Image (cartoon, rainbow, N blue to C red):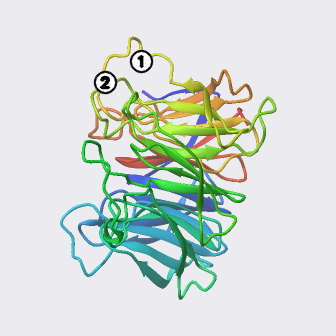
């Protein structure tokens, strides 16, 4: 049965499972995990009664499980995950959603290989994690959508050694190859998660020439991949803070569940981990557990408070207060029931709206709309 503390379920949307949820105004955008479901758009003017406005489908072998919206533009990813028709192609599709009930295709920016995984979008620039011709794994790329009919790459960055076509030597013969997961921009910085290669902080004062500031990787000692690097919007105890979520999948070896790190980046050239957070009770002695028990993803949209919502896979929604970044503490949670046909929930992504409502998507089935007293 569902359990809750300082939270209350307002509504459940019975829909295919998904990878990302995003809210723009009173419209909810849902990126689904498996075809033919691509993207669903809901009116949430009355959050207790969500109303489906439109759906976009994708062909077999491709998924469109991420979605971001700003300035009337919706970006969805196209990424190959199985046997797929090659002519569909990987990349990002751009839609006019000034009328969310009638999304209108504007253009598609194509990339080489599998396509685009996750990304950030500020209304003009998209910060992507595509596969690219001549490169090993995904890299970081910046695409300008000032003219959405003609998206234009303006910058890219990769770990030296990824550019095989440029003659760079592969130094990872005994380790997993690099894979950019996604960049998040704050000011003139990109905070880039790079899977089993940790995270990188880049200076993007010149978007055409991102430059490295610093790098850390915990993946050899703690075998979970780095999923998200979230810069906090305020100082905490006078310090600049970045939260780093490891994802509880694709472990280098069996281990206890993944967790979140707290990094002090006041000196951004020397990031230092000052704390971690794990949901109480799921790691009692460090024994290996099955994947998707632990951490996945924090909300990339924050309220301006020190409380951050996390999607914690089988542990549902966790609300964590980082007011003291040296000692984060849980202040609320919502543990959903497992979707029909599944043994446990798999909370995959979470976001907020301007009303302070929380949207939690299960990668298997359903979206929960939740209110909280924690903000």
Question: Could you tell me if residue 94 is visible in this image?
Answer: yes
Instruction: Farthest residue to the left: give it.
Output: 83
Q: Which picture quadrant has residue 197?
A: top left
Please tell me which residue lies in front, 226 or 92: 226
Mark 1, residue position:
283
Q: Position of residue 47 (x, y in %)?
A: 62, 53
Please tell me which residue lies in front, 117 or 3: 117
Q: Secondary structure at mark 2?
A: loop
Identify whether 30 is placed above or below 102: above
Disc count in the image? 2
Q: Secondary structure at mark 1?
A: loop
Mark 2, residue position:
289
Which residue corresponds to the image point at 30% horizontal and 45% vertical from the top-left? Answer: 176
Question: Could you tell me if residue 360 is visible in this image?
Answer: no
Q: Position of residue 33 (x, y in %)?
A: 35, 56
Which residue corresponds to the image point at 34% horizontal and 66% vertical from the top-left? Answer: 135
Instruction: Farthest residue to the top: give it.
Output: 285
Q: Is residue 246 left or right of residue 78?
A: right
Screen quadrant of the C terminus:
top right
Q: Is residue 273 left or right of residue 233?
A: left
């Amino acid at each position: 049965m569902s359990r809750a503390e300082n939270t209350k379920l307002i509504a459940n949307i019975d829909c295919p499972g998904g990878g990302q949820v995003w809210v723009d105004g009173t419209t909810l955008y849902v990126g689904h995990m498996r075809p033919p479901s691509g993207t669903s758009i809901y009116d949430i003017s009355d959050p207790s009664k969500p109303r489906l406005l439109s759906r976009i489908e994708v062909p077999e072998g491709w998924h469109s499980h991420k979605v971001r919206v700003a300035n009337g533009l919706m970006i969805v990813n196209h990424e190959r995950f199985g046997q797929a028709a090659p002519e569909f192609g990987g990349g990002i599709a751009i839609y006019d959603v000034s009328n969310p009930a009638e999304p209108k295709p504007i253009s598609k920016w194509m990339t080489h290989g599998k396509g685009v995984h996750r990304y950030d979008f500020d209304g003009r620039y998209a910060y992507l994690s595509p596969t690219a011709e001549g490169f090993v794994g995904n890299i970081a790329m910046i695409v300008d959508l000032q003219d959405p009919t003609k998206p234009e790459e303006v910058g890219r960055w990769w770990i030296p050694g990824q550019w095989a076509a440029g003659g760079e030597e592969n130094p990872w013969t005994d380790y997993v190859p690099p894979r950019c997961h996604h960049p998040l921009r704050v000011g003139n910085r990109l905070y880039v998660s790079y899977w089993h290669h940790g995270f990188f902080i880049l200076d993007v004062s010149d978007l055409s020439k991102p430059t490295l500031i610093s790098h850390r990787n915990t993946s050899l000692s703690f075998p979970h991949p780095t999923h998200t690097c979230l810069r906090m919007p305020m100082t905490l105890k006078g310090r600049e803070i970045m939260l780093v979520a490891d994802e509880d999948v694709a472990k280098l070896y069996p281990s206890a569940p993944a967790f979140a790190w707290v990094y002090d980046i006041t000196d951004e050239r020397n990031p230092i981990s000052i704390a971690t957070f794990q949901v109480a009770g799921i790691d009692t002695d460090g024994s290996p557990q099955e994947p998707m028990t632990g951490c996945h993803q924090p909300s990339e949209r924050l309220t301006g408070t020190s409380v951050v919502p996390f999607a914690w896979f089988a542990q549902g929604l966790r609300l964590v207060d980082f007011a003291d970044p040296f000692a984060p503490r849980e202040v609320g949670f919502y543990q959903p029931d497992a979707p029909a046909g599944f043994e446990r929930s798999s909370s995959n992504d979470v976001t907020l709206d301007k009303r302070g409502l929380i949207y939690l998507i299960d990668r298997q089935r359903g979206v929960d709309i939740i209110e909280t007293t924690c903000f």
